[in-house]
Image (spheres, coloured by chain):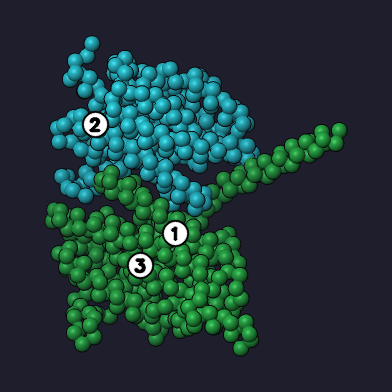
Chain colours: A cyan, B green
Amino acid sequence: MMSEQQLQQATFEYTLRLGDDALVLGHRISEWVRNGPFLEEDIAYGNVALDYIGRARMFYGYAAELADDGRTEDSFAYTRSEREFSNLLINELPRGDFAYSQVRQLLVDIYANLFLTRLLQSKDATLAAIAAKAIKESRYHLRRSREWVIRLGDGTEESQHRCQLALDDIWGYSHEMFEMDALEQQLADAGIGVDVSSLRDDWLVQIREILAEATLQLPADDWKVSGGRDGYHTEFLGHLLTELQIVHRSYPGCQW
Amino acid sequence: MTPEEQNFMRKIETEEKIEPKDWMPEAYRKNLIRQISQHAHSEVIGTQPEGNWITRAPSLRRKAVLLAKVQDEAGHGLYLYSATETLGISRDEMIAALQDGSAKYASIFNYPAQTWGDVGAIGWLVDGAAIVNQVSLQRTSYGPYARAMIRICKEESFHQRQGYELMLELCRGTPEQKAMAQDSLNRFYWPALMMFGPHDSESAHSARSMQWKIKRESNDDLRQKFIDQTVKQIEFLGLEHPDKAICWNEARGHYDSGEIDWDEFYAVINGNGHCNRQRLQHHIKVHEEGSWVREALAAYNEKQKARKQQAEANKSNQNVA
């Protein structure tokens, strides 16, 4: 049994993980602004990126409240290095082409809807409240990524090829979303966190259905990469953080 | 004048809006296509200098605000393209004209957004100058354009406030931050004044546009409004005015100001800005990179249509049987 204080520390770390996921993916999506295949997509990507940045702020804001040591949302976003970031690796992969970003988004969006549905039941009122706001956004995100993957998969030979390549390249990073470590197990047992290991079956059912409609092949489960929760990242994250943090770190202690 | 022309001029004189299906002189239509599409292109190209800062915004709050702002600008581009389409030109044709250089975008976006302070200066000064112009365009004679302006102005005034507030934060910060703000003001003040275009006496399209009430106020009058309103804003920030000749003229009821460097204005318009080539090349590159997506979308829609037709054919065959 964890003490009240241990539980709070664990909740803090957990919240930070969720904030990191949101910030890093939000950053990747924001890279599409002014780079989309047509104007409506620029706007849609901006919208989704904004949802994720908003989500990061809610999680970081709550983490700051739990830490209660003067750190703010910006301390978490701007003053930690890659070994301290605990986002899932799938979120830090580069934006790639439009197929790559939409396929990644589909895998993440189905997961997010399942995850947030569970987080709604969290005994932690703040986490449940964040989930309530975020799930509305994630439903819309999923509608969009689902439609795009179907259209691209069942579009031209080229678009199908690009989607399949993306799926094959990303698939090995999807397994990590369903891994539990001791911290997450403790919080799931306490009714605060989500037991993500139980989400994969439902996730896979939805994936299969969409891929069938998109005429895409489900990749084999013959490779997987993980380590994000322990700060063991791909080389991409360092560059992402370099860009994200450059101004903030160049002028230490400033207000913006 | 033909009866159609008479009726058109009567509407212009009585402030009745011209609507898409109304008769209009060909030159009026062309003039509007030029002006509104240029405005749309400016919104779209304008997402480049600011979009350049989304990934580097120094706080999450600023990042969210900037994302929302750039998204708004792209949205303005969208409704201005739609407004232009009511004049009988397609978005594809407009984009082609932008990319081959026959249509223009605001020359201000050929200036680089080098520092974080520039994001503030662009919101405050560039959007600020745009609003002065757009407020007067809310009364423009072409209905769809006037209505688009009303909506756009509401969002632009929010953009200007965010830019100014960003500058204010810099000016209340460390000496380095304040120097950043001053530097951005110095670089963007004069180009913002140039946004109103050449002096009235030099302006190629002005006289006719005024007669048709496409334009409602002259370049110089609008510029004067902007000069006047900006003086106090600069003072409040505690920054130095970039125009050393700025001076209140009691008799005119306006500020007198120094002369704009028109050589720079024409040089940048004619391709000598820091970013002229990059802005267009970026637009073309992204458009080309997106071509397979647009093709896939068209192919998918075709397939869906064929499937639907097939399903309906099967259904009616069954009914016959």
Which residue corresponds to the image point at 54% horizontal and 22% vertical from the top-left?
A205
Q: Please state the chain letter of the residue tagged with numbered disc 3 in the rendered image.
A: B
Residue B2 lies left or right of residue B243; in this view the side is right
Give the CA distance from mark 3 to mark 2.
40 Å
Question: Disc 3 residue type?
Answer: Ile
Query: Which residue is found at the position 46% from the left and 20% from the top?
Result: A200
Badge 2 element:
helix
Q: Are marks 3 and 2 on the same chain?
A: no
Q: State the SS at label 3.
A: helix
Q: Which circle's residue, 1 or 3, is located before the other in the chain?
A: 1
> Where is residue B253, by image quadrant?
bottom left
Label 1 neighbour load within 10 Å: few <14, some 14-19, many 20+: many
Residue B131, numbered circle: 3
Q: Which residue reaches farthest top?
A: A1
Kindly identify the amino acid type of the residue bearing the numbered disc 1.
His
Task: Give amino acid for label 2.
Answer: Ala
| Residue A17 image-quadrant placement | top left
Point 45% across, 50% down: residue: A43
Identify the subunit bearing mark 2. A
Distance of mark 1 from mark 3, alpha carbons? 13 Å
> Is disc 2 in the same subunit as disc 1?
no
Q: Is residue B183 left or right of residue A229?
A: left
Query: Decide: marks 2, 1 in contact (CB < 8 A)?
Result: no
A109 over B49 or under it: above or below:
above
Residue B42 % position (x, y): 43, 63
Quick check: do tags 1 and 3 share a chain?
A: yes
> In whole angstroms, how far apart are the C-alphas of marks 2 and 1?
37 Å
Label disc, if present, on residue A63 of the rendered structure: 2
Q: Which mark is residue B76?
A: 1
